[in-house]
Image (cartoon, grey):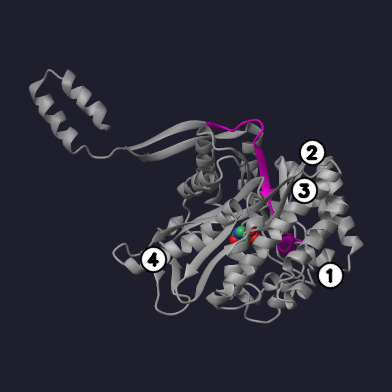
Amino acid sequence: MKKKNCFTKLIYSTNFFLSIMLGLSCVGAPPHAFSKTEEIKFPDSFEWCVATASHQIEGNNKDSDWWEFERRGKTIENEDRSTKATDHWNRLEEDTQILVDLGVKTYRFSLEWAKIEPQPGNWNKEALEHYKKEILLLKKNNIKPFITLNHFSIPYWFAKKGGWTSPQAPHFFNRYVKKVFENLGHLGIESWVTFNEPVWNLISGYVLGAFPPGKKDLKLLAAPIVGVVKSHALAYKTLHKIAKKRNIPIKVGLVKALNIFETLRKWNPLDHYARSILERVYNLSLLEALQKGRLKFSFPTIVNMDKELKEAKGTLDFLGVNFYTRLFVKFTFSPPFIKTETVAAKDKITEMHWEIYPEGLYKVVTKAHQMFPKLPIFISENGIADKTDKKRIPFIKDHLYYVYKLIKQKVPIVGYCYWTLIDNFEWAHGYRPRFGLYELDLKTLSRTPRPSAIFYKNLIKKKGFSYEKKGFK
Ligand code: NOJ
């Protein structure tokens, strides 16, 4: 019972005993469970989307750093290897039909640098033709291609030269980006993403040892982050320069993973400190570099990064936000000194051992919007690994409810991509986690829509859904 209602009733009550009872309940009114249904409607222009990444679905990415990493042994859960992945490379027609069936307006996918440039300066025309075919197929079906230029994997030759730590990284990346735009830029692609989740990629590769190059040293993190910021800034300028010359309207952005970080032991100042460092390194540092042209983060005695990167300032036309979970942070006395844990009830945990925390999407987007009040925001990824498909529909609804709330508050969110279309190769976790709206049969590679795919299709058709809100008041 709401206190206001409670006191109103008290004022109008003429019965003495009733007044006493109501008075008591006003002081300590017990919470009441409620459920109410709200019709959630999204604007007509809202871009319904699904997202994928080349290495995770195409197969045969033989010239990439991941191909080599997967073959080192003990690097991937169950010793899985991407190998044929979902064989998307050979199933363009079939998978485009799935997108058509779902009714998505936009398809976010990535180009594989290692396939386009398998050896330095050696361009694979067949790969470029393949992507051209994919883009034209999408356009023919009125689906907007939303392209990511780098989604984690890189050519092995580039990795051997030091990857993002190499002083030549911006030059190599720029050469690739230029080639891509010269070949595909005229096909009518509005939005280009330079990097997907670069900070998470580099933490995984240089601090946690879970991604290539498989290093485990916090000291090593600074150099590749600088390399990525410089590469992004240069690519941003190059894309705009060529597009302007050819009179092609484009938007260039970056996709950032944002997490909610909470202090694990509230009484422990070291945990608070560890949380603040992670917040800065993971969530803030790169965004700030793009906002102010200065990259700043430190880990006392190990890394002290404070670098002017003027060229990065203002190099975003939109921001992609990937949101998955909330983590609790604690300090540990052995490297890397910061540890994260998932704290949640069993029914709120996914196959990735991540907490389902929809409100977090609201919080991270609010922060991003405060940092970049003028920028359009795309929810470039949000999804759940759930083989049973029992949690997926509520997951999507709960997250979209917060997207809707943000739009109502005039936050310029232009679209939402569910991650992902078909179960795929989930990096260090191999094929175990099942994120797909479509189930992949690992033997036959056939794709079967899960109930959540039907739900997503209907939601797109209706531009909304009936949302049953549950809670206490
Ligand atoms: C974000 C990454 O961009 C994507 O590649 C990955 O599969 C999902 N997170 C799920 O972990």
Q: Which mark is first along the chain, 1 or 2? A: 1
- What residue does disc 3 label? 240
Circle number at residue 142: 2
Estimate the spatial distance between the alpha carbons at disc 1 and disc 3, rounded to whole Å: 26 Å
Seen from the viewer's position, the closer of residues 315 and 255 is 315
Q: Which mark is first along the chain, 2 or 3? A: 2
Q: For the point 74% across and 56% down, which residue is it?
A: 235
Q: Amino acid at mark 4?
A: Tyr
Cβ(mark 4) to ligand 1 < 8 Å?
no
- Find the magenta span and give its range: 40-58
- Quadrant containing the C terminus is top left
Q: Which mark is first along the chain, 4 or 2? A: 2
- What residue does disc 4 label? 273
Q: Secondary structure at mark 1?
A: loop
Q: In the image, which is nearer the foreground, mark 1 or mark 3?
A: 3
Quadrant containing ligand 1 reads: bottom right
Q: In the image, which is nearer the foreground, mark 2 or mark 4?
A: 4
- What residue does disc 1 label? 118
Q: Amino acid at mark 2?
A: Asn
